[in-house]
Image (cartoon, helix red, strand yellow):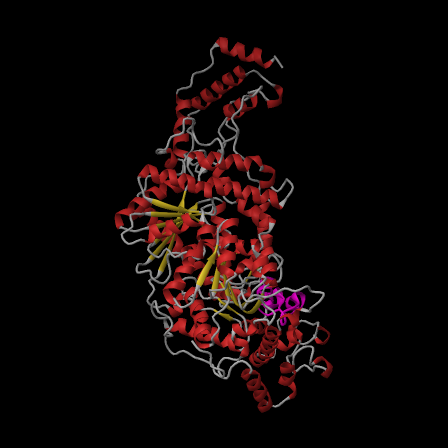
Amino acid sequence: MASDPETSGALDSPQQELNPQEEKNDPPFLLKLPPKAQRPEKEMDPEYEEKMKTDRSKRFEFLLKQTELFAHFIQPASQKSPTSPLKVKLGRPRIKKDEKQSLLSAGDNRHRRTEQEEDEELLSESRKTSNVCVRFEESPSYVKGGTLRDYQVRGLNWMISLYENGINGILADEMGLGKTLQTIALLGYLKHYRNIPGPHMVLVPKSTLHNWMNEFKRWVPTLRAVCLIGDKDARAAFIRDVMMPGEWDVCVTSYEMVIREKSVFKKFNWRYLVIDEAHRIKNEKSKLSEIVREFKTTNRLLLTGTPLQNNLHELWALLNFLLPDVFNSAEDFDSWFDTNNCLGDQKLVERLHAVLKPFLLRRIKAEVEKSLPPKKEVKIYLGLSKMQREWYTKILMKDIDILNSAGKMDKMRLLNILMQLRKCCNHPYLFDGAEPGPPYTTDTHLVYNSGKMVALDKLLRKLREQGSRVLLFSQMTRLLDILEDYCMWRGYEYCRLDGQTPHEEREEAIERFNAPNSSKFIFMLSTRAGGLGINLATADVVILYDSDWNPQVDLQAMDRAHRIGQTKTVRVFRLITDNTVEERIVERAEIKLRLDSIVIQQGRLIDQQSNKLAKDEMLQMIRHGATHVFASKDSELTDEDITTILERGEKKTAEMAERMEQMGESSLRNFSMDTETSLYNFEGEDYREKQKLSMLEWIEPPKRERKANYAVDAYFRDALRVSEPRAPKAPRPPKQPNIQDFQFFPPRLFELLEKEILYYRKTIGYKVPRNSDLPNASQVQKEEQRKIDESEPLDAAESEEKEALLTQV
């Protein structure tokens, strides 16, 4: 497409960025790197620097037009108020005249000129790049593989607006709404309407490389996309034969390749840098984050379905990457949007919305995709098998001092206990030595030794009969090994993907599962590796074998199936082991999600304090259900059919949802968020004190079976029934000898005394009362009465023996 001199200025044509001294065989957008001492960077590429300067002016003008709040971040540090935003009234800050050139002329004009003068300045700056702004009312003609939906057209127009204003942004649509397509449409717009074919870089997770390449070919085939992946030799050949000649528009690669080939990528003057799953750079000190910040880029776009999920500092890290000249001070940002104050003051929440608005676009499926079938989650609560109960008890007994708050409260120790307990809840075979063998066999013991496997076995049979196809997620790859054995034993055809699966095998597995009339029944994935950017909408059931600490990770896993293209209602089954640490993990995740929806729905911003897993909270999780587990060694598994189990799960899921909803409607906003005890302050009452009192309760460990050197104490308790609750107290014969357990009388003496007591009760016609405090009161009553009714008096020899034994101490 020919370049229009009025609609495409000198800065928009990559051919005009060519340095006159460049060699002819170098691509026009390759950045030559002469010695730094001889030539400053800005002289190296003056047109690029002019483009950045122009964008900077437009950017400041645009931001200040959005809200005066940005004046605080744009003006110099010496002019910024150190006080809390709660105490500052926004006005028009004054900027000294000599600071004008070093900072921003447009920002200064915002406060020194009239509206008309300001408009003229904005128009003047806009003309330097283009005086035409394209707005699409329908899907662009260059999109060939189909048509964009209405909300996708709006998203494309939003990104075009960002580009025209020199703003970088975050496309944060909920997973499954087509962020990939909207991004490709933007790059297509640059090529067909702005005569900017590239070069563009798209950084994506390794598992989605193939999907991105297919989407480029499908939607905008005029964009020449290449993919950098492979071993060292393959990469070297690709760089030499493909990248350096420059006959391409878009380079798609993974995070790992960027780190390994950073020196090559630094040579290019990138037009757009797109980062998929952008929360990978939320830590500005990570290696990936530092490397991508060094690249020369005109524009940057971040894609994420779960943005800003941890804390305000991570929000700053993303904004700093997008606009380093605006958000250059983390301390300043944190002070102005202090989490504690922000969440307690509605005005500050509104200010945070105002900061996010120019950069972030987020839509959720329920709002824009009316035709997408709903998603229904059912939590299935299950008991422990006998083997699981034994291992769970072993883990707790190993750290019984911690359980009763007597040992050192080391966070790593607590985390290790939590991890071991979660393994036990999944399957005891995750512990070395638990599986019977050798020889090791694959049969029913795989199922009946785990409560979750028992339910999963019943559920999968039902789903197969219904014609459903299943995505099975777990946090633990070793559990996937067990599930593989199970699938082979049951004859279920399956695919598998985890963090160790080679790239080629990943793509083959996805294609086999999504193929028309595929015979694959189950796709098992590790939650972290398989929860990002993979389209598996041919499945209609998602089973979460275990739950992640971060609820957003589980949501990503669900949305592998619940996305555009899905024609059935997606059913999500979450397996939870009752009366264990898993119950608390899921409850905590529910609270996190509920708070998330209250604070900032657009960006899923969660308070940093509530996101921390404190030591006392971990201890409470570990203690939860410990008494229940210690109470018995028997299995809790039942022979209930899957329909009954699901009905009970649906009821419990609905009850939990209703409870969360009521909390939100009443006063979740009244939660005190200024301390780490935020989740324990509700409606003015401090539940942390109640929690501390409950932690003082001693958890009695189970009695260990062992040989005793002296059995007198045990026999004494049994003979005189002092360990069982009795009401009223049973009569005893007069002049009964006073015997103490520390006197070590022979066991025979207690037998004779017991016989004497029983006969005395028979002679007075004593009837044993029913003790309702005992769980099996009726049985105990009958047994005690039988002993009395069948009792006989001591004969002469036994009486003499008793008197002799009493004198032995």
| Residue 77 visible in image | yes
Is residue 276 visible in this depiction of the protein?
no
Residue 321 drawn in magenta: yes
Q: Is residue 417 left or right of residue 506?
A: right
Indicate the quadrant where residue 785 lies.
top left
Residue 127, horizontal then vertical, whole percent? 54, 84
Quarter of the image with the C terminus in it: top right
Q: Where does the image place residue 55, in percent across and percent down from the top left?
A: 58, 76
Residue 719 magenta: no
Q: Residue furthest top?
A: 797
Residue at 33% x, 55% y is 538
Q: What quarter of the picture does the N terminus occupy?
A: bottom left
Q: Which residues fall within the magenta stretch?
A: 313-342
Most foreground residue, 60 or 635: 60
Residue at horizontal 61 percent and vertical 90 percent from the top: 114
Q: At x 41% / y 41%, what residue is drawn?
A: 383
Q: Nearer the viewer, residue 707 or 171?
A: 171
